[in-house]
Amino acid sequence: MFHVKLPGHDAMARQADEHLVSAQVKLPKREVGRPLRQVAKRLAMALTVLVSTAFIVFADRDGYHDNHDGDVSLLDAFYYATVTLSTTGYGDIVPAGDTARVINILVITPLRVLFLIILVGTTLEVLTERTREEFRLNRWRSQLREHTVVVGFGTKGRSAIQTLCATGLKKEQIVVVDPSAKVIEAATADGFVGVVGDGTRSDVLLRAEAQKARQVVIATQRDDTAVLVTLTARQLNRGAKIVAAVREEENAPLLRQSGADAVITSASAAGRLLGLSVLSPSAGTVMEDLIQQGSGLDLIERPVIKAEVGRTAREVEELVVSVVRGHRLLGYDDPAIGKLELTDRLITIVRATPGPPGVPDLRPLPSD
């Protein structure tokens, strides 16, 4: 069980208390019943068989002989049913009449077999399910490479995952980390692997295989939590691309100092979009369209192809917004761009055509 206390962060401590759960990996589950419900159902079936056998014996009690007092009471019938179905068979109560023996052959014996199947089957099912789940988990760990870890499955986290899936990322390559067990259940129901636990703890991120991740998306509700998650993730994985969201713009430099490669200020971004929509509703609609991946217009980053080498940014068929050269981001009209090089990357605006889920059909938007 994990309980995190940070000096000067009582609110975070209270939140950790509310979500005090173990860091447990949750693979997407198949449609199966709950284990306790399955056991209760099997137990009820076993008791039904036991009671039915006891009443069958009691109804034909004259055909049975009790070595103790000769008579078979209701208690004796239940006793006989118990020792018979469990194959104990002390022999103190035996079927003496022909009818009782026929009933034992045709009814009691099949009920005994059914009783044993119910009990043994329940044990085998629990062991088999546990072994199967352990095998799936080990196989998942061994095959997981270059995946994406998303810390926080709230509105921002779900939107980020939706955008990633729209660009072709498979659900099997996404691991969700959240302290709420209910949230992780929702994530696994959508087909994602989930880890229940506090993303600020290194052991929780290790269970999400963050040390092997290609990128980490931090979409927590609090800025201080985002800082701690960023520090922990960067410590575990020096080469991963870390993108974090913060509510307050003044906390963005702190996220960058903590190791985030990119910081998105959600509150100010939403405010600027609101202001733009007030000044120009059409411009606001275009910006919102660009943000929504997979429909209308999309912003994409792609490498320069051989046919484009030596051209200017304006000569490319698509609308080029910026050029990434090395570690520099150059605007489309920056004189430093000159001629495009093979190692450059272009950020362009393309038109997205609806296609199969997760594989958008992107067509270039003419620059003329």
Image (cartoon, rainbow, N blue to C red):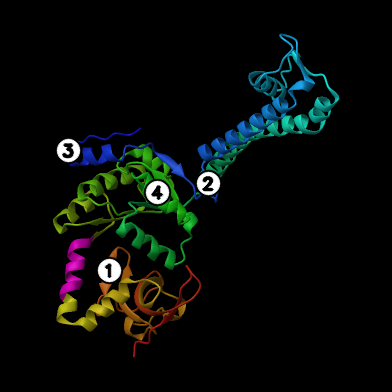
For this rendering, which residue is in front, 363 or 64?
64
Q: Which residue is mark 2?
A: 140
For image coordinates 40% across by 48% down, the residue present is 184
Q: Which residue is mark 3?
A: 10
Q: Dot 2: what SS?
A: helix
Residue 122: x and y, percent? 62, 34
Q: Residues within 10 Å of mark 3 (few under 14, many from 20)?
A: few
Q: Of the two numbered discs 2 and 1 on the same chain, state the one appearing first in sequence.
A: 2
Marks 2 and 3, how far apart at CA: 37 Å
Q: Residues within 10 Å of mark 4 (few under 14, many from 20)?
A: many
Q: Which residue is mark 4?
A: 184
User: Which quadrant does the C terminus fall into?
Assistant: bottom left
Q: Dot 3: what SS?
A: helix
Which kind of residue does numbered mark 3 sit on? Asp
Q: Is residue 317 left or right of residue 72?
A: left
The numbered dot on residue 329 is 1
Q: Of the two numbered discs 1 and 4 on the same chain, state the one appearing first in sequence.
A: 4
Which stretch appears magenta? 265-275
Which kind of residue does numbered mark 1 sit on? Leu
Marks 3 and 1, how far apart at CA: 41 Å
Quarter-of-image position of residue 43: top right
In magenta segment, residue 208: no
